Amino acid sequence: MDSKSIKKFCKELILKLSDYREWKPIKKTMPKITAFEDLKCWKEARLLVRDIYQITNQLPFSKDYGLKDQIQRASVSIMANITEGFARYHRKESVRFFDFSQSSAAEVKSLLYVAEDLAYISPESGKKLREQATVCQKMVLGLIKHFNRS
């Protein structure tokens, strides 16, 4: 190869390599969540609220106004605190509200035992609802871990 052909080859190679200068590795990231309604934990909490309201509006549960009110408020609190935490600007504030949310899930589980002990709900219903509350709680705890890593 003569020097002219070597120069030509180098120029072509440089041109081809310049195409790769703009190349950046693809970073696998999850799509950014921009609305609280997209959070799986919020969706799960919403289902729990619906189920709690359905069961507490049946007799004899519906006549125990104190317990009915307390468990309904605690279930709504799970959902509401996820929303409020998501809307906060500072990470620490978000985590604080997510912690309120998971604590409310624990409260719902406890109150379901009371309802079961008073024979307001069947053991099967109590177990199903406690499992739903546990799922919510674990999801929110996962969200807290994610925010603490960020």
Image (spheres, rainbow, N blue to C red):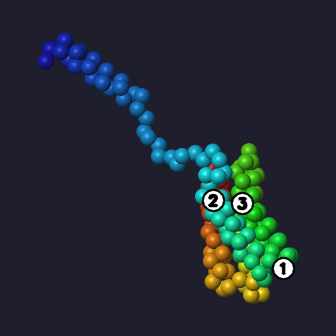
**Could you tell me the amino acid type at mark 3?**
Met
**Splitting the image into 4 quarters, where does residue 111 fall?**
bottom right
Mark sitting earlier along the chain (1/3): 1
Front residue of this view, candidates 93 and 124: 124
| Residue at the image point whose x is 75% and y is 58% from the top | 80
Residue occupying the far right of the picture? 66
Which comes before the other along the chain, label 2 or label 1?
A: 2
Residue sticking out furthest to the top:
4
Q: Which mark is residue 64?
A: 1
- In the visual, does 12 lie left or right of 32? left
**Residue 97 against residue 67 in the figure, above or below:** above
Q: Earlier in the sequence, mark 2 or mark 3?
A: 2
Alpha carbon distance from label 2 to label 1: 28 Å
Q: SS at mark 1?
A: loop
Location of residue 133 in the rendering, given as x and y in whole percent from the top left corner: 66, 71
Residue 82 in view: yes
Instruction: Name the residue carrying label 3.
Output: 79
Q: Position of residue 19 (x, y in %)?
A: 35, 26
Describe residue 28's horizontal placement relative to residue 146 as left or right.
Answer: left
Q: Which residue is mark 2?
A: 43
Q: Amino acid at mark 1?
A: Asp
Choose mark 2 or mark 1, whichever is in front: 1
Where residue 127 appears, as percent x and y from the top left, is 64, 80
Q: CA distance from mark 1 to mark 3?
A: 23 Å
Q: Is residue 103 something one can see in this rendering?
A: no
Is the Cβ of the residue at disc 2 closer than 8 Å to that at disc 1?
A: no
Give the structural element (helix, strand or loop) at label 3: helix
Residue drawn 40% across the image and 28% down it: 21
